[in-house]
Image: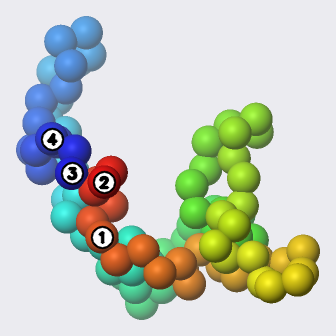
Amino acid sequence: MLDVPILAPTDPSWPKLLRIHPLLDWSYAEIWAFLRELDVPYCELYDEGYTSLGSTHNTIRNPCLQLEGQEKWEPAWKCKLTRPVNDTN
């Protein structure tokens, strides 16, 4: 896991604010269940097989979501990750 506290001050070069990271210990599945249950709007690229969004140069669809033998992908919420989102191991 990343060593990021749920409550943390901003970096010294930023204005003094308190950062709050309430989702750090949620699993990928828990986040998607929350978004879908409450009908929270999200970027439509997640419905096209993307599970992480970066720039136009490094964002690719998640190969685990590709339908076998097709050029189609399942939506991100079907991804089977169960570990907390901040777990990089």
**Disc 4/disc 3 C-alpha distance (Å):** 6 Å
* Label 4 Cα neighbours within 10 Å, binned few <14 / some 14-19 / many ≥20: few
Mark 4 lies on residue: 3
User: Of helix, strand and loop, which one carries label 3?
Assistant: loop
Gap in Å between the C-alphas at discs 3 and 1?
Answer: 10 Å
Q: CA distance from mark 4 to mark 1?
A: 15 Å
Q: Nearer the viewer, mark 4 or mark 2?
A: 2
Quadrant in the rendering for residue 16 = top left
Residue 71 point in image, percent of width and height: 90, 74
Relative height, residue 73 to residue 43 (above, below): below
Question: Are the residues at dot 4 and dot 3 in contact (C-beta closer than 8 Å)?
Answer: yes
Residue 57 falls left or right of residue 6: right
Quadrant where the C terminus sits is: bottom left
Of tags 2 and 3, the one toward the viewer is 2
Q: Residue at x 26, y 16 (%)?
A: 14
- Residue 86 position, x and y percent, is 29, 54
Q: Are marks 2 and 1 in contact (CB under 8 Å)?
A: yes
Q: Which mark is residue 89?
A: 2
Mark 2, secondary structure of its residue: loop
From the image, tell me which residue sits under label 3: 1
Type of the residue with mark 2: Asn
Indicate the position of residue 19 as horizontal and vertical percent values. 19, 39
For the residues labelled 2 and 3, say whether their Cβ atoms are less than 8 Å apart.
yes
N-terminal label among 2 and 1: 1
Q: CA distance from mark 4 to mark 2?
A: 12 Å
Looking at the image, do the residues carrying marks 4 and 1 touch, with CB atoms under 8 Å apart? no
